[in-house]
Image: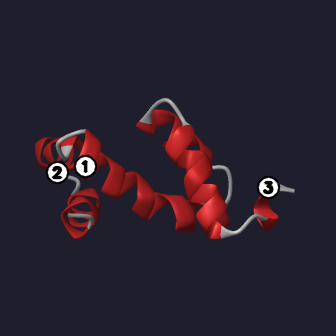
């Protein structure tokens, strides 16, 4: 099963997905995927989406999301 794949392979799969929304959906399927892909998702957002997650968090008062976004880059 997919959960037995190495973390590096899971990140490679996530990198091939079309959108951050798709990566987020995959990450939310279970706790192992979430713990491995959530940091990937924030790094990707910093690198590819000009830190839009940080702007969103600031506009909506989401401190936890802001901290994760800042931590990613």
Residue situated furthest right in the rendering? 1
Asked whether the viewer can see residue 21, the reply is yes
Give the structural element (helix, strand or loop) at label 1. helix
Could you classify mark 2 by the number of other residues whose Cα lies within 10 Å: few (under 14), some (14-19), or many (20 or more)?
A: few
Q: Position of residue 41 (x, y in %)?
A: 41, 52
Question: What quarter of the picture does the N terminus occupy?
Answer: bottom right
Q: Quadrant of residue 63?
A: bottom left
Question: What quarter of the picture does the C terminus occupy?
Answer: bottom left
At a point 20% along the width and 48% down the height, the residue shown is 57
State the residue position of label 2: 61
Of the pair 5 and 28, the residue shown nearer to us: 5
Tell me, for residue 67, which label it has, or none. Answer: none
* Numbered disc in front, either 1 or 2: 1
Residue situated furthest top in the rendering? 18
State the residue position of label 1: 47
Could you classify mark 1 by the number of other residues whose Cα lies within 10 Å: few (under 14), some (14-19), or many (20 or more)?
A: few
Asked whether the viewer can see residue 31, the reply is no
Say above or below: 24 vs 9: above
Say above or below: 56 vs 12: above
First-in-chain label (3 vs 1): 3
Q: Position of residue 2 (x, y in %)?
A: 79, 55
Of the pair 68 and 44, the residue shown nearer to us: 44
At a point 55% along the width and 47% down the height, the residue shown is 14
Q: Are marks 1 and 2 in contact (CB under 8 Å)?
A: no
State the residue position of label 3: 2
Give the structural element (helix, strand or loop) at label 2. loop
Say above or below: 25 vs 33: above
The answer to whether residue 11 is left or right of residue 47 is right
* Numbered disc in front, either 3 or 2: 3
First-in-chain label (1 vs 2): 1
């Amino acid at each position: 099963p997919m959960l037995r794949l190495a973390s590096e392979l899971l990140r490679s799969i996530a990198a091939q997905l079309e959108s951050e929304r798709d990566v987020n959906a995959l990450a939310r399927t279970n706790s192992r995927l979430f713990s491995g892909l959530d940091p990937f998702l924030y790094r990707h957002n910093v690198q590819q989406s000009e830190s839009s997650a940080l702007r969103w968090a600031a506009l909506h008062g989401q401190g936890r999301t802001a901290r994760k976004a800042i931590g990613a880059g």
